[in-house]
Amino acid sequence: MVDDDTTNTGPAPAAPAGTWVPFPSSGDDKKRQEAKPRTPQTLSPTYRLAYDDPDFLTSEATRGVRLQLELMKPELALIEAGILSTVVLFGGARIPEPGKAAWAARNEGQKARLEANSRYYEEARRFARLASQHSANSSGGKEFVIVTGGGPGVMEAGNRGAADVGAMSIALNITLPHEQAPNPYATPELCFNFHYFATRKMHFLFRAKAMAIFPGGFGTLDELFEALTLIQTGRMARIPVLLFGAEFWRRLVDFEFLAEEGTIAPADLDLFRMVDTAEEGWEAIRGFYSF
């Protein structure tokens, strides 16, 4: 028995106008279900259509389905928007805009350091402007599109830099108890929300042609080292990985020590480059791709 679902209400394209579709869509059946008499039978959770049953869709048994949906939904939207490649911009959510108070500081020392680090907010914003202007000029905004985690701090600066030049930018938000409401500068139609860190990470790298990593915390380090591992092991194509703020990164991680100890190869030190300014970072990308 064939069951058609070509005219559903999801993000996939519907059948072309005028196409004969002999079967009801899932959306049509959902409406019919809602119009049925309210009886003990129709009100039973077992009677719900499987795709319209939130208890079923959020159950442990359907975790694999949810992972698949989180891969599929953003991908379909990005295809529809024509996004061909991205520049991934990571950095601390707690770094404030210059002139603003360090809302995340837990003591006076942190307040002073976070506010001093606000220079990275401005550098990220300028870098995103450069990438986005090139994107607009060279590909109509389809290549080298800025993608961030969608939150505040350096992520906001990235989306904001794109918005400064009227460009699209992507936000991959995630459900957390703090910090992760979408910033107002991401393109609304390209702002996504995730439950699973794993699927979010995959979407960060699917179209990545470069990574710009600004000072940040555990999340920033997690994304950086995952990408470096994928490139190091040949599971991902080599792309420019730029660490903004050489002083910060040299104090945080002794990469040379890893090479000296033999836990990474000496050549692995070439998988990333430390830079200090937006212009230096963008020139590194231009040099890598020869444009």
Image: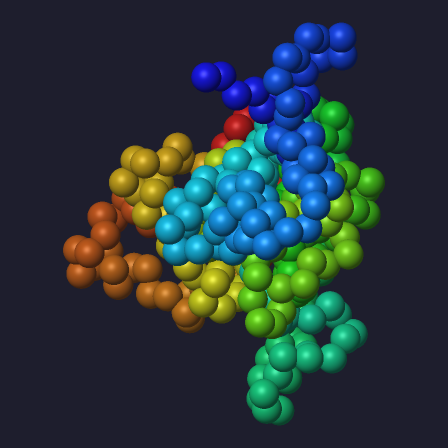
Give the percent coordinates (x, y) of residue 285.
55, 37
Query: In the displayed structure, does residue 70 sit left or right of residue 25?
Result: left
Q: Residue at x 56, y 45 (%)?
A: 48
Quadrant showing the C terminus: top right
Residue 65 falls in image quadrant: top left
Q: Residue at x 59, y 39 (%)?
A: 74
Can residue 123 be seen by looking at this rendering? no
Can residue 198 be seen by looking at this rendering? yes
Residue ranking furthest to the left = 262
Q: Residue at x 39, y 45 (%)?
A: 64
Give the percent coordinates (x, y) of residue 239.
45, 37
Q: Is residue 134 above or below residue 14?
A: below
Q: Is residue 14 above or below residue 87?
A: above
Give the percent coordinates (x, y) of residue 63.
41, 50
Residue ranking furthest to the bottom = 108
Label count reads 0
Q: Residue at x 30, y 35 (%)?
A: 234
Q: Who is closer to the viewer here, 222 or 118?
A: 222
Specify how the rendered protein is coloured.
Answer: rainbow
Give the percent coordinates (x, y) of residue 115.
67, 77
Q: Who is closer to the viewer here, 261 or 156?
A: 156
Query: In the displayed structure, does residue 66 sit left or right of residue 235?
Result: right
